[in-house]
Amino acid sequence: MKEIKAIIRPNKLAVLRDAMVALPGFPGMTVTRVDGCSAPSRHVPARTKIKDELTDFTPKVRIEIVAPDDVAEAIFKRITEVAQTGHYGDGLVWITDVQRAAFIFKTTPGPE
């Protein structure tokens, strides 16, 4: 199992959701609204103070997906294709190994 995480621009979320749902084997995703800032050296317009850089947060969306190994690379590729605009601040995507995962649901009646 793999965990795919991505930080993307909020305006790309609807298009990404549609692209993910169309992907065979897509297991679902968790979406969180977050704020972030890039490293000062990544911005094209230079700021005069690092304090200005570190407090200049922009809205982003964090996507988290746990998927089987055979689907993870396709998900990774789809995110990078759909979420990019060609500008700084498009986001970041990464994959990590998951040692164990299980859905939490009750399958048989029994004492609670």
Image (tube, rainbow, N blue to C red):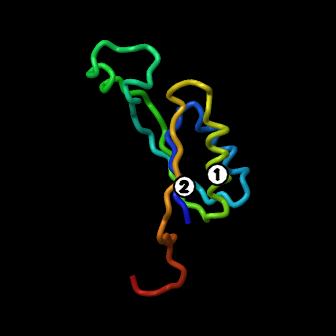
- Could you tell me if the residues under marks 2 and 1 are in contact, i.e. CB atoms within 8 Å? yes
User: Image quarter for residue 56?
Assistant: top left
Q: Which element carries disc 2, helix, strand or loop?
A: strand
Query: Within 10 angstroms of label 2, few (less than 14), some, or many (20 or more) residues?
Result: many
Rendered residue at 66%/59% (across/down) = 71
Q: Earlier in the sequence, mark 2 or mark 1?
A: 2
Q: Name the residue under label 1.
A: 75
Query: Where residue 64 sits: x, y (%)?
Result: 50, 51
Query: Within 10 angstroms of label 1, few (less than 14), some, or many (20 or more) residues?
Result: many
Up the image or down, 106 lies above or below 54; here it is below
Relative horizontal placement of residue 92, taking residue 54 as reference (left or right): right
Query: Where residue 103 sits: x, y (%)?
Result: 51, 70
Relative horizontal placement of residue 78, taking residue 110 as reference (left or right): right
Q: Which mark is residue 65?
A: 2
Between 7 and 29, the one nearer to me in the picture = 7
Q: Residue 54 carries which label?
A: none
State which mark lies toward you, 2 or 1: 1
Spatial separation of the CA atoms under disc 2 and disc 1: 9 Å
User: Image quarter for residue 78?
Assistant: top right
* Amino acid type of the residue that numbered disc 1 sits on in the rendered structure: Ile
